Every structure is written in structure tokens, then in C-alpha cells.
Image: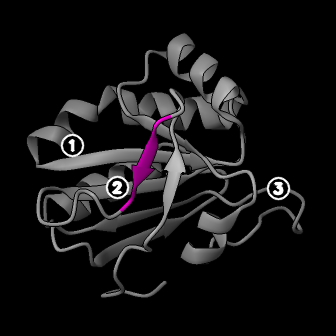
Amino acid sequence: MKTGDLIPDLSLSNEQGELISLRKFIGLKSMVVYFYPKDDTTGCTREACAFRDHYEDFTEAGAEVIGISADDEKSHQHFAAKNKLPFNLLSDPDKKAQQAFGVKRGLLGLVSGRETFVFNREGKLIHQFSSLIRFEQHVKEALKAIKGE
């Protein structure tokens, strides 16, 4: 994806089995969509907890946070409950969302990528950040983009 592109028209199941459309927030909220490799791994837990710890900052700025990985709903449900995550985790087992967003695989193609996409209220991409190892930086980059800094 490149700056100005519209959020892909996809619907994925969240940790409760509810189908969530990525375009449902257009006109209502800005969106932060972050892709991560796997539930319950050290880096992914640190990243998810950083988004959790700053969730109120995002909501006060008028944004919704959504995490996406290939893990199934049951894994997401456990991960969300264990870490008290207040936002949706969407399941992308066939990687259709990863493909639509153009998420690149990391570590010589061995693991799913870690990328964050920030969309304005109109659903257009305003910022993108990719780093497999700078977990908390995803949150900082997203907040900065949402607040227009």
C-alpha cells in the first residue's frame, strides 16, 4: 500500500467469531491496523500490551486499533483475555489481509511481517511503519500519525 490508498475492503473474524469489516469505521474514526506474527510470543505480546497501554490515547484521538495475525479465533481469544486487550484481534488464516495490505514476510521469509498502517477518517492511508524487532515503536509511530505530529 502507498499513502492515499483506501483501506482494503475485507471482513475478518475477531476473537469472538464476529465478522468485522475493515471499512466499517470510514467516516467515523481513524484506524490503526497492525499486523503481527503470532499470539503469545515475546515480541508480539510486548507490542500488543504497548497498544493496550496507549489504547485510551488512541480513542481520545478518535482512532480505533485492530490487530491482525494468522492465528485462529481461539488463540486470539486466549491472547486477548490473558493480556486484557481492549481492541479487536482479527484472524487472517489464509493471509488475504496480509496480501491486500502488501505485508512483507520477515526473517528471510520465515515469519509473518510486523507492519502498522494508519488510516484517516476517510479510510485513506496516512502512515505506514514496518519493523520486526522495534515492537513499541509501532505504537509511537501510530500515535504520532493520528495526532498529526
Q: Position of residue 60 (x, y in %)?
A: 9, 39
**Badge 1 vs badge 2, beta-carbon distance below 8 Å:** yes
Residue marked by disc 3: 111
Which residue is disc 2 drawn over?
32
Element under disc 1: helix
State which tag comes first along the sequence, 3 or 2.
2
Q: Earlier in the sequence, mark 1 or mark 3?
A: 1
Q: As rendered, which of 101 and 22 lies closer to the eye? A: 22
Residue at x-position 44% and y-position 15%? 84
* 36 sits to left or right of 106: left
Secondary structure category for the residue under label 2: strand
Q: Secondary structure at mark 3?
A: loop
Q: Are marks 1 and 3 in contact (CB under 8 Å)?
A: no
List x then y, in percent, for residue 83.
Answer: 51, 16
Q: Say which of 50 and 76 sits in front.
A: 76
Q: CA distance from mark 1 to mark 3?
A: 28 Å
Q: Mostly what secondary structure, the magenta segment?
A: strand
Does 24 appear in magenta? Answer: no
Q: Does 112 sit above or below residue 74? A: below
Q: Residue at x 54, y 32 (%)?
A: 17
- In the picture, the quarter occupied by the C terminus is bottom left
Range shown magenta: 18-22
Callout 1 crowding tier (Cα within 10 Å): few <14, some 14–19, many ≥20 = many
Distance of label 1 from label 2 (alpha carbons): 9 Å
Residue 96, percent from left and from top: 66, 67
Which numbered dot is residue 58? 1
* 65 relative position to 60: left or right: right
Determine the CA span between mark 3 and mark 2. 22 Å
* In front of the other: 14 or 128: 14
